[in-house]
Amino acid sequence: MKKTLVFISLIPLLSFSQEKEILHYFKSKDSLVGVKNQAGKIIIPAQFINLTGLKEGEIVEGENNTIFFDASLADKKKIEKNSWGVVFDRKGNLLYQPYSYDNGADYFSEGLRRFVKNGKIGFVDRNAKTVIEPVHDFVSPFNYGYAAFCDGCDWEKTNEEHRSIVGGKWGVMNIKGQTVQSLANPTAQDVEIDGKYYPNPFQYNEKEKNILQFFEKQKKKLSDLYYVNFYNKLSENEKNLFFEIVERPKENFPYYQVNTYNHRKKDLDMLYRFKFLVSEDGKAFYGIEDFNEKKIPFENWLKAEIKSAEEFQKEHPDNPNKFINE
């Protein structure tokens, strides 16, 4: 009995020792923001313009042992062109500067995020590990296992808010950063990118096939839910969906991520809609609720989508793509 009590009493101590050190934001006299630990030691010097309203003493919230400053460096000479924000580890080491997209830091797409270094663009994973070195002048987000890139290209301003890429030599890379050649004789399994076809990049073991089968069994319902508010009548082929595992369990991320693609194998949404997480053992399924990847049980997610679709049809009884809850 005494041994058992001693073992139990150690659990809180062991758990506490494994927790992250609590860090706080602090402000300098000129209102720049940095990070200190609880002992008052400066971890990240105050060098960021406080664009997001961080408060003195506010606890640093960060996933995967990183700290993201959604703000500009005060020293503009240190800001990479076409970047937004800066990512540090919790010891204060600069990890990378995310690529700027849609007036903010680039989103993770298929588990990878673009970053900028010396004017070139590469990719990091959720743990801030460089997966593809920054060697190209521009790279698109990954979609269905591929990303388009160009060298010798540049941005051209089209209006006050938008720019477009012009010139340069273009190619297509896989998730290893390798250039992939288009196929002369593609099949229905391959993927089209800008009028050319490339090999289907996805391969699965039996466990992963079973995970995808969960979604395949509900394809018709999920398709009708997604397309219920489209104003043009779509054929069943146009409403066909593909489900693919784009990320596998890793440190700080014990899930499979499943993305949904349309009949042309294009991502339905770059953020979170119709993206799912599955536990490492393949038994628990979740929907992603917001851009912070908050997860909810799949059954709850599905009920919410059905309710939203039914409410839409009540307000728009003439919608051409009907959802029927069977």
Image (spheres, rainbow, N blue to C red):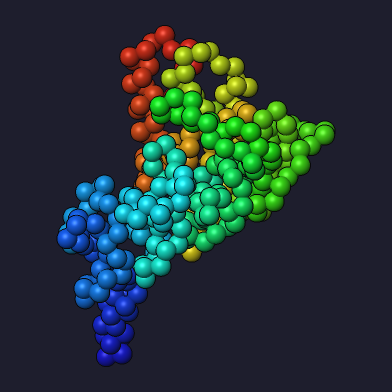
Q: Residue at x 70, y 28 (%)?
A: 195
**Where 93 falls versus 307 (above or below)?**
below
- Residue 276 lies left or right of residue 300; in this view the side is right
**Where 243 falls versus 177 (above or below)?**
above
- Residue 245 lies left or right of residue 325; in this view the side is right
Location of residue 85 in the rendering, given as x and y in whole percent from the top left corner: 38, 51
Quadrant in the rendering for residue 45? bottom left
**Where 242 falls versus 315 (above or below)?**
below
Q: Residue at x 57, y 30 (%)?
A: 262
Q: Residue at x 45, y 62 (%)?
A: 95
Q: Which quadrant is the N terminus positioned in?
A: bottom left
Point out the residue furthest to the top here.
318
The tally of labels here is 0
Point out the residue furthest to the bottom here.
2
Q: Which residue is drawn at 65% across and 52% down?
A: 177
Depth check: give the residue in front, 75 or 317: 75
Location of residue 118 in the rendering, given as x and y in whole percent from the top left corner: 53, 54
**Where 97 falls versus 233 (above or below)?**
below
Location of residue 188 in the rendering, given as x and y in whole percent from the top left corner: 74, 31
Depth check: give the residue in front, 91 or 307: 91
Location of residue 169 in the rendering, given as x and y in whole percent from the top left corner: 69, 38
Residue 50 in sight here: yes
Depth check: give the residue in front, 47 or 44: 47
Point out the residue furthest to the right here.
185
Point out the residue furthest to the front here.
77
- Residue 154 lies left or right of residue 19; in this view the side is right
